[in-house]
Image (tube, rainbow, N blue to C red):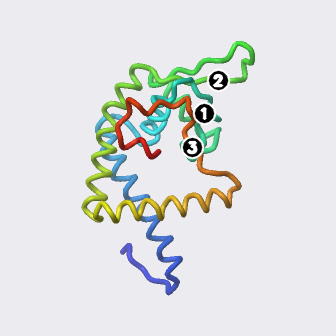
Amino acid sequence: MYDWEVGDPFFIAWVRMGQATEAVYRAMEIELGKQQATFAQAHVLLVLSLSKNALTPGELAPYLFREKHSVSALLTRMQRAGYVRKTRIKKDQRVVRVRIQPKGKELLDRAMPIVLRYTRDLLASCFTQQEVKRFDGDLKKLRDRALRELETGATALPETFDLSNADPSFASL
């Protein structure tokens, strides 16, 4: 049903990578749904929780691998739910800054253990720690190559991000 061969190993690997990504995200969404959370919400809340400063949707977008308008729509829904607060800058009313709210912190505190447990359990069931490190390096290489094709780069966390209180797993973000 899901395995099919077309003779081109590069195309087959690409299809399987997409299938694996979709299957993992769908399974994780089911787990997060039990906490009334989505992976996109958890990702936004994680980035906001690590930032010492409020961020604009445009500043958030590269960390989420989404377009600015997509981030803006997600933030609007999250504000309605009470997870974030958007405020306009007095100097320029077009500029919106976003901060995590206590309700968003609570959701993040419930969601991140699920994400971490799920990903660790899934990867550990398929790979050794050494294989995971190799796999991560391969994925980083692939991601960075794709970003070069898009004429952008992987966005490192700026100094305004504080990883000192974060789970040690976040240090490599």
Give the labeled residue for mark 1: 72
Residue 140 is at least partly visible in this image = yes
Asked if the residues shown at circle 1 and circle 2 are in contact, with their CB atoms under 8 angstroms apart, the answer is yes
Q: CA distance from mark 2 to mark 3?
A: 22 Å
Give the labeled residue for mark 3: 156
Q: Residues within 10 Å of mark 1 (few under 14, many from 20)?
A: some
Horizontal and vertical percent position of residue 173 = 47, 45
The residue under label 3 is which amino acid type? Ala
Q: Quadrant of the N terminus?
A: bottom left
Residue sitting at 61 percent across and 62 percent down? 145
First in sequence: mark 3 or mark 1?
Answer: 1
Q: CA distance from mark 1 to mark 2?
A: 10 Å
First in sequence: mark 2 or mark 3?
Answer: 2
Q: Secondary structure at mark 3?
A: loop
How many numbered callouts?
A: 3
In the rendering, which numbered label is found on residue 64? none
Horizontal and vertical percent position of residue 69 = 64, 38
- Single out the residue that lies furthest toward the bottom: 7
Which one is in front in this view, the residue at disc 1 or the one at disc 2?
2
Give the labeled residue for mark 2: 96
Horizontal and vertical percent position of residue 67 = 63, 44
Please, is residue 57 above or below residue 101 in the view?
below
Please, is residue 120 above or below residue 4 in the view?
above
- Single out the residue that lies furthest toward the right: 92
First in sequence: mark 1 or mark 2?
Answer: 1
